[in-house]
Structures are given as C-alpha cells and as structure tokens.
Amino acid sequence: MSSAAIATQALTRRFGELVAVRDINLEVAPGQFFGFLGPNGAGKSTTIKMLTGLLEPSSGSIEILGLDFLKHPVEVKRQIGVVPEGMALFGRLTGSEYLNFVGRMYGLDRETAAQRTADLLEFMQLADQPKKLVTDYSHGMQKKLALAAAVIHGPKILFLDEPFEGVDAVAAGTLKSMLQRMIARGATIFLTSHVLEIVERLCSHVAIIQKGSLVAQGSLEELRAGVEAESMTGTEGRVTGARLTLEEIFLHAVGGARAEQELSWLG
Amino acid sequence: MAGVNGEIRSSVQFQAILRLRWQSFAHSLRTTRGTVELASHVFVTLLLLLGGTAGAAMLGLAAYSFVVEDKVEWVAFLLWSVFLFWQLFPIMGSVFTETVDLTGLLRFPLSYRSYFLVRLAYGALDPSTMLGTCWLTGIAIGIGLASPRLFLWAATVLAAFALVNIALMQTFLAWVERWLAQRRAREIFSIFFFLLLIGLQLLGPLAGRFSGSVGPEVKVLGSRFSPIQRVLPPGAAAVGIDGAARGNAAAFVAATCLLLLYGAGALALMGIRVRKQYTGENLSEATTGPALSRAQLVTPGWKLYFLPAPVVAVLEKELRYLGRSAPMLLTLVTPVVMLAVFGLGPARNGAFLQRSPDLSYPVGVGYALILLTNLVYNNFGADGGGVQFFFASPVRFRTVVFAKNLAHVAILLGEMLILWISVSLMFHPPSLLMTVTSFAAVLFAAPINLAAGNLLSLYSPKRVDFGTFGRQRASQVTVLLSLLIQGVVIACCVATFVVARQLERPGLAILIFLGLAAPSIAFYVLSLRHADTVAQARREILVAELCRV
C-alpha cells in the first residue's frame, strides 16, 4: 500500500486501436498542489476521468489515499471532490438546491448541507440570484458552482479539470484563494490547466503528458534543473542565463515547435 | 481577401447546412446504436405512413360521401379534426415529436431570411405534419373520386390549408415556448391550456351526445357558431371547396385568399419570435429579486425518516425537475382529459366508458402508466451532464436508480388519486373491488415497466430538455421497445379482466394480478441489483451521450 495520496501503476486506456493513455505511473504526495499538463488531446482528461471513476482503465491500477479505486470505489469517492470536464451540473435546479443535493449525496445531514450551501454561495458570490436556475448561469458562475459542489463535503483530494477555463479574473482570484486555503489545511489538489502561468504560481509539482505517455514528472525545481542540465550538455542548444519558465519547460518536454508555415491569406 | 465573395449566397449556406446534417447522419451510422436507431426510425416512419394511409382512407371515404350527398360544406368536420390534431399533437405529444435547436447556426453569417426559412423547413419535418398532409391528401382524393372536376380546386384549397397548418403550428409552438419560459406564465398557461383542451375535446362528444335530440337552444348555438367557424381556417377551407362545387368562384377565391392571409399572419407572428431568437434572445427565468437573508437563501432539503438521505436527495431533485417542466406536466394531465373524452361520448355510438363506467378507473390508470413511460424509459435523459455526478459520487448507482423509480411511483400514485377523484366526479366512485383490482394490476405492470425502463435508460440513453417543447423524446429504439413492452403488459391486463368477467368472478382478477406481480417484482429487484454493473459497463456511453451539447 502506497503512502501517496494518488498513485497509479501502468495506467492505460485504449479506445479501440487508439491508446489514449499509456503506462502512466503517477505519484502525488499528500498536501501537494499537483499540475497535470499536456497539449490538446494528450490524454489529460482521460487520465483525470480514470482517477475519479468516470472512466474504466483498460489496465493498470489506481490507488487513492492507499485504497485501490477499483476495489473500493465508494470509500474512495467519499474522500475526493471532482470538477469534471462537463462540470456535472443539474441545469434545472437552482444553485442552492444543487449544492444541497450534492451535500446530501455525500452524506451530510440536512442542517450541515444547508449551512455549507449558504457559506459556499456567499463565498463564491452566487447568492444574489437565488431563484436563478443553473442552466441560466454564465459559464464562469457554473464553474464556481461546480467547484463549490466539489468541496462541500470537505474532500481530502480535489480533482479539477480546467477549473480556470472561462472564469474572469475576479472569480479566478476567489478560486485560487480557496484552493490555497485547502492546501494549507492539508488537502491534495490535482488539476489540469492550459493556463501555465496559473499552474506555475499555484502548483508545487507537475507532470507533463504527451501523446498518452508521461514525459516529465517532479517538482518545478526538479524539472527546471533537468532541462537546464540538458541545455548544458548542448543537446538542446538553449542559450540563456534566465530562470526557465514553466512554459519553456513545457515546450521543451513536448517538443513544441511553432508552425513555420505562413498563412499568407490572413493578411 | 482572395477567395471570399463579397456577397454570401443563401443557397450555398443551405447546401452547407444540408451537408452538415447528412454528415452527422452518416457519422451516426458508425456505431451499432446509430444503425439500430436508423432502423427504428424507418420502422416508425412506416408506422406513421400506415396510420396516415388508414386515416387518409377513412377521411377520403367521408369526404367522398359528403360530396356525393351534396353536403360539401360538411367537409368542415373533417378539416376541423385534422386542424386540431395538427396544432395540438406537437404540444400534447411533445415526447413523441422532436425539434432541433437551430440557434447554433446563428454564429454564422446567416441572414434573418435564411434562418427563418431553415427554421420553417426543420419545423415542417414533424409527425403531425406528415400525418396531416397524408389525411388532407386522402380528403382531396375522396373529393376527386366523387367529383373529378372538383379535384384541382379542392387540392388548391387544401394545399393552402396545409400551409396554414404548418405555419400556425410552428407559430403556436414558438409562442408557447416563450410564454412558458417564465414560471408564473407557465402556471397560468397550464391551467388555461388544460381547460381549453377539455373544452375542445368535449366539443365532439357533446355534439354526438345531443345530435339525436337537438333542442332549440342547441340549434341556436349551432347557428351562431357556424358563421364563426366559416371564417376560421378549417371552415374557410370547406367554404372554398363548397364554393368551387357550386361554381361560386367568388367564394372559392375569397376562402383561398383568407387561408393565405391566415398563413401570412401566422408567419408574421412567428417572425416576431424568430427575429428575437435571431438577435440573441435568451429565454431565461433569471430574476433579480430582493436580497434574501441567509436563512431564506437556503432551505434544508426534504426529510423522510424512512428513507436514506441520498434517496431523498434524488427523489427531491426528480420531483423539482418535473415541477419545472411544463411539457411533462401537460403530458401527465392527459389521462384525465382522455377519460373525459371517452367517458362523455355518445353512449349509443359506442362510447366505451359510458357503457362500462366501472372500467373507467382501470382504463385511466392504464393510460397514466403508458404516459409515465416517457419518464421511466429515459431515466437520465434530463440529467444531461449531471449524470457524471452520479458516477463521481459515493452513492451506488442502484440507489440513484431506485430513488428515481420512487419518484415515478410517487407520480403514478398521485395520478391514480387524481383519476379516482375524476372518475368519482364524472361517473361514480370506483367500487372497492375495482380500486383494489387496479392497484393489483399496477403491482404487476409498474415493476416490469420500471425494470425495463431502467435497463433501456442505461443501454439507450438520450439527452432531453424538459423545459422545451419537442425536446423530450427518448431514442427511437427506446420508444419502440417501450411500446412493445406496454403492448404485452396491456394485453395481459385486458386478458385478465376479460377472463374474470367471463367467469363472473371479478375477484379472480386480483388474484391473477397478484400472481403476475410476483415475477414482475422479482424482475425489478434483479434489474436493480444489476444496475451498478450495467451502469459501470455503460458509463462511457452514458456520459458521452448525455454530456453532448
């Protein structure tokens, strides 16, 4: 049994002939703010779906808080919170009805669910339109509501798939402060995001996936040191004295070269 | 810029839209489910054609006899029934019809005119239009056979009448959708529509009931209504055909022009809605009411001592969803309406419930059960992306399914109570024996339906929108299989009643139903036990299908 909060071994997912995720070995320690990065279609969402029970792995194992997910799905789900790609909202409930519903589904008693619902609606600044149905919320409001629902039961691990996508700067600030508070209280957060600046600011550890395989994993410092070491040996030919940004590490890991072809018709 | 024309031609855009539809259709055939769905569509279309042809034959025969008997204006009766069906079926049977959300096209540089035409064309692809067109064709043929020289004239008027129906039906739907976007309007409209429906449905049976003994008041009423109906679309069409039959060109031209005017008016009214949609209207219930206190902001969820919290949470959610769906609520009130129609019809002409009022309660309950299948057989359709939550939450899937079934049973029991009261008011209170027999029948029929519904919900899910007319239809495969299962269940129930009556032992039906209920409940329990396994095995398809936007 691993002491890691999240541990996978040879995690693989196939869709017919296509191997979307191949032999992934992830290890996320408790209390880590973990960023999971990769280009579009690299397998991030597939991985997070497998880690949260939304998708069955083709092979490999997943341990969450030392429990085998496939053997103890209910016990594991009790301790995690998820904001999946589609946000998993029920459009024809109001925000408070939805949070109440989620709280009850996670076993909170009526009073606690109601109290936490009120707290979260106020914290997320969603309390001013109590009769509005979720389907009428803006994208950013839905994201905030989905995040509120993911934390209402006080999970030990939070899985977030693109939590900052479509969220304005004010709301993003609110979300970030909430996530940082959770980390300070010992929770583990696993997030995917395309906004590398946010990941760089929030995450202590990062893994990068490319075409279904992990190409880098470790703390930001470890990854930075790795890239710099390669540059020193001259294999990559990078000449710069400045501290590497996450974007540079990412591009190095995924071999991202900008398209050279010119789209002349764009003017 | 090179390659871009200064003017975007509508025909090019129409071709692109057609191509898009074709490609979507072709890609859907890549999966087994898509292929089965196509087969079901073909089957349903054939069924509709059959219904259309049979109806056309009957209406044609009636039209033939009216013309032969020189009562051409009586064609109005036929046209009124076609008209009412055409306009009301898309709303009453919203679960059987499907409209496509075309607002996604608005991101393209589509002109208002093009958007309007595309909407009109899509709206015309509807079962009621298909059946209505078949029936009008039948009437035209009937008239043509009786009087060949009248055929072209009648066909012209009926074509105009068909156009009015197509335009009016879409206008009606567009405005109903607008009104029902607001909760208050929804409540008022539901009551109004319910009363209107009862009124309209009762017209025919009441006319039939009093036709043998027409009193002077009825004649006065009839003579007053006749001029009014003559200027309404069905009456105007009949006047046009009658005018042509009598060589009265002025009447023919006036009636045809009136019909075209109706069509234009309907299109203009529809245009107001489409224009709003085109400019980006969002029908939402968003209200900015006064700020609420913390206690007012959140009220704790329901509490039912005898049920676990997750079950109560799902039950509450399901009933809230239903309460916010005007189309589903309207569907659920139809058993009472149908009871009134069948019950108050002319007894000597075979109004079944008039002759056997004792059967009105079980018949009503049976009808309620049939309509409930709209909910039961696509359990997760209205949840959309929310279904992911059920997979991510620490609650077993069988618990969720069970809670949803509890909601269905609660609705059914509520309907049974309303029907009991309705039957008591319309006829007399159902006897204790009949009440118990009906409950025993439900004990047999409901678990089978719930079990089959749960399995089909997992095997053949389809995202539906409870808030919009025409977007509640389950997958075609589900619709067909549910009809098949209902057919078998109803046949068993009818056979049981018949056997008990033949043997003159009414109590026997209770025993038979209870006997049948045992395997039915066992089947339900078995299906519930397997719900977790099936759901886990099908989760990718469920999520992919229900999260689709």
Image (tube, rainbow, N blue to C red):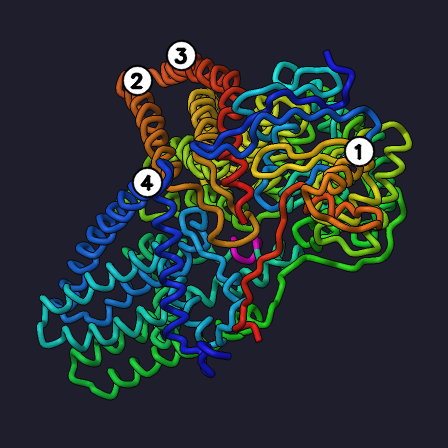
Distance from disc 3 to disc 1, alpha carbons, whole Å, reads 71 Å
Q: What residue type is labelled 1?
A: Glu
Res. B420 visible in picture: no
Above or below, B153 against A206 in this view is below
Name the residue carrying label 1. A222
Give the structural element (helix, strand or loop) at label 1. Answer: helix
| Front label number (3 vs 1) | 1
Residue appearing at x 55%, y 58% in the figure = B192
Q: What residue type is labelled 2?
A: Glu
Mark 1 near mark 2, Cβ–Cβ under 8 Å? no
Mark 2 near mark 4, Cβ–Cβ under 8 Å? no
Name the residue carrying label 2. B504
Distance from disc 1 to disc 4, alpha carbons, whole Å, reads 52 Å
* Range drawn in magenta: B190-194
Q: Which chain does the numbered disc 4 sit on?
A: B
Distance from disc 2 to disc 4, alpha carbons, whole Å, reads 50 Å
Res. B390 visible in picture: yes
Residue B35 has which mark?
4
x, y percent for residue A7: 70, 22
Q: Which amino acid does label 4 sit on?
A: Thr
